[in-house]
Image: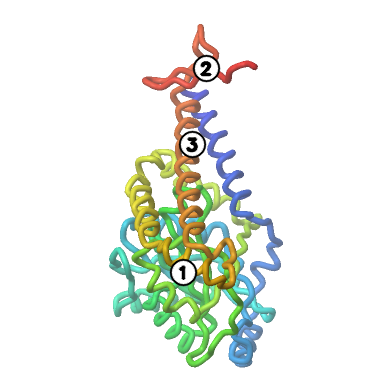
């Protein structure tokens, strides 16, 4: 029957999309023993030794469960355009690795620019931790996450203060930031992990890092505090016990993604990015740059030029729109398309894609 065929085709599409998502986010299969091994003595020894006091870059990587990552993205997406906040559960290893096993949301009311954990959230965190201990879930709270809807993964001034307080009283602790809007626009999870430097520490000047697209109204906040923390790479993993949970979570994730059009869902974000590019171009002082060339000042690297940065932002925005258009065409072909009898393409209700022309 057509309905059975449609369900089978939808299940196959969901499975293919899940595999594509795992490839794009580089989800690696890991051994169960390495993930679920827990030693209270080892964790206590790390806490007593406090190696992060001697080496500010002690923590080198964050290994995050694919289940935790999907839960974070779904929570962040449900709060758009407001910021949301939650906590991470896991452990640390003697070689400086955060292993994040799970994540849970906090009952926090955020705004479009900030989110803070109040007394109610702290009480909820204590109650949740006690409940986990009662059922034998031994992982500690090892970090927090929050969302930056539409303006990238970095720490603002308030985020830096929050992370510094956590590192003073609840070490070891890391901060994770996710952008649900850019995640929906690009298909790849836009996420980052961070640690702040101790008070009074001045990091060495490493020169310009990788360019990050940040809205014009956030650049000042980013520039003031960008030297107070460093980014930790995130690696995503899954194991044999995660597959069933991942499939159940993926069904909801896939349905939410399937039922919304990126072109419509991210329309406001696209308009905002275009306006931001225009404002950045208006601030470029062409006369000043020509004057510097006359004085024969040292030539800037290509990626340092303001115009080149605007071009990167514009190209990224165009690529995300093209991907959204491609996914929309694919949905038409999968769920509304039918073979035309006289044409070489797919016909849909009010939409038609012609077959490629022969040379």
Nearer to the camera, 47 or 57 = 57
Query: Quick one: label 3, few (<14), some, or many (20+) residues within 10 Å?
Result: some
- Percent position of residue 64, x then y: 58, 64
Secondary element at image label 3: helix
Q: Marks 3 and 2, how far apart in space?
A: 17 Å
Marking on residue 317: none
Q: Which residue is mark 3?
A: 327
What residue appears at the point 34 percent right and 65 percent down from the top-left corner? 217
What residue appears at the point 63 percent right and 87 percent down from the top-left corner? 55
Q: Which residue is mark 1?
A: 154
Q: Which residue is mark 2?
A: 345
Residue sitting farthest toward the front:
294
Do the numbered discs 1 and 3 sit on residues whose CB atoms are within 8 Å?
no
**Mark 1 vs mark 2: which is more N-terminal?**
1
Instruction: State the image quarter where residue 92 is shown.
Output: bottom right
What residue appears at the point 51 percent right and 19 percent down from the top-left corner? 354
């Amino acid at each position: 029957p057509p309905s059975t065929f449609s369900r089978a085709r939808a299940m196959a599409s969901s499975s293919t999309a899940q595999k594509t998502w795992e490839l794009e986010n580089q989800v690696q299969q890991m051994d169960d023993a390495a993930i679920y091994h827990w030693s209270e003595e080892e964790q206590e020894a790390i806490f007593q030794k406090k190696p992060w006091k001697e080496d500010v870059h002690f923590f080198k990587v964050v290994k995050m469960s694919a289940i935790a990552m999907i839960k974070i993205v779904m929570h962040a997406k449900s709060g758009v355009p407001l910021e949301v906040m939650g906590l991470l559960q896991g452990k640390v290893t003697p070689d400086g690795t955060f292993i994040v096993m799970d994540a849970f949301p906090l009952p926090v009311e955020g705004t479009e620019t900030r989110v803070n954990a109040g007394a109610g959230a702290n009480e909820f965190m204590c109650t949740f931790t006690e409940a986990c201990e009662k059922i034998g879930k031994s992982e500690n709270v090892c970090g927090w996450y929050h969302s930056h809807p539409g303006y990238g993964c970095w720490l603002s001034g308030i985020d830096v203060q929050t992370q510094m307080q956590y590192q003073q009283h609840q070490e070891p602790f890391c901060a994770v930031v996710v952008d649900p809007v850019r995640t929906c626009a690009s298909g790849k999870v836009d996420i980052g992990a961070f640690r702040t430097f101790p008070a009074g520490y001045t990091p060495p000047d490493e020169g310009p890092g990788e360019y990050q697209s940040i809205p014009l109204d956030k650049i000042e906040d980013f520039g003031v505090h960008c030297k107070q923390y460093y980014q930790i790479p995130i690696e995503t993993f899954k194991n044999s016990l995660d597959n069933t949970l991942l499939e159940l979570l993926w069904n909801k994730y896939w349905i939410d993604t399937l039922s919304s059009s990126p072109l419509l869902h991210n329309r406001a974000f696209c308009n905002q990015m275009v306006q931001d590019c225009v404002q950045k171009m208006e601030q470029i002082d062409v006369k000043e740059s020509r004057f510097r060339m006359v004085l024969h000042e040292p030539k800037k690297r290509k990626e340092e030029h303001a115009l080149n940065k605007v071009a990167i932002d514009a190209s990224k925005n165009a690529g995300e729109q093209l991907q959204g258009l491609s996914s929309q065409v694919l949905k038409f072909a999968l769920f509304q398309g039918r073979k035309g009898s006289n044409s070489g393409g797919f016909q849909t209700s009010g939409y038609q894609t012609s077959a490629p022309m022969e040379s």
